[in-house]
Image: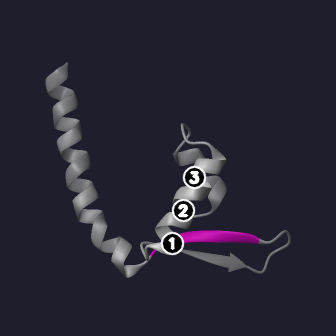
Amino acid sequence: RRFGELRVDLPRISAKVLSTRLRELESKGVGERRLMATSPPSAEYLLTALGAELVPAIDAIVRVGHKLKRRAR
């Protein structure tokens, strides 16, 4: 995904915080930044194999969150 696409998906996060978090994920080996030879230059962000291993755990947390939200109503 490109940075702008991530900003649309995460409207409550500032560009500065998103950029910082993406750098942190990259430094931990969870995400990867690929520079594209376009004009103007752009980058794409993707999960590494390690990051992909986190997806099932995150999905489980989201499902439990939805259940808790329904119970609170």
Name the residue carrying label 1. 26
Side of 69 relative to 11 (left or right): left
Q: Residue at x 52, y 57 (%)?
A: 21
Q: Is residue 20 above or below residue 37?
A: above
Name the residue carrying label 3. 18
Q: Position of residue 22 (x, y in %)?
A: 54, 62
Identify the amino acid type marked 3. Answer: Leu
Identify the amino acid type marked 1. Answer: Glu
Label pair 3/2, CB-CB below 8 angstroms: yes
Magenta residues, start to end: 42-47
Residue 18 inside the magenta-drawn segment:
no
Q: Is residue 14 above or below residue 45?
A: above
Say which quadrant the N terminus sits in: bottom right
Q: Position of residue 59 (x, y in %)?
A: 26, 55
Q: Which mark is residue 22?
A: 2
Side of 31 relative to 35 (left or right): left
User: How crowded is the residue under tag 2: few (<14 C-alpha within 10 Å), some, or many (20+)?
Assistant: some
Gap in Å between the C-alphas at discs 1 and 2?
Answer: 6 Å
Side of 22 relative to 37 (left or right): left
User: How crowded is the residue under tag 3: few (<14 C-alpha within 10 Å), some, or many (20+)?
Assistant: some
Q: Is residue 29 above or below residue 54?
A: below
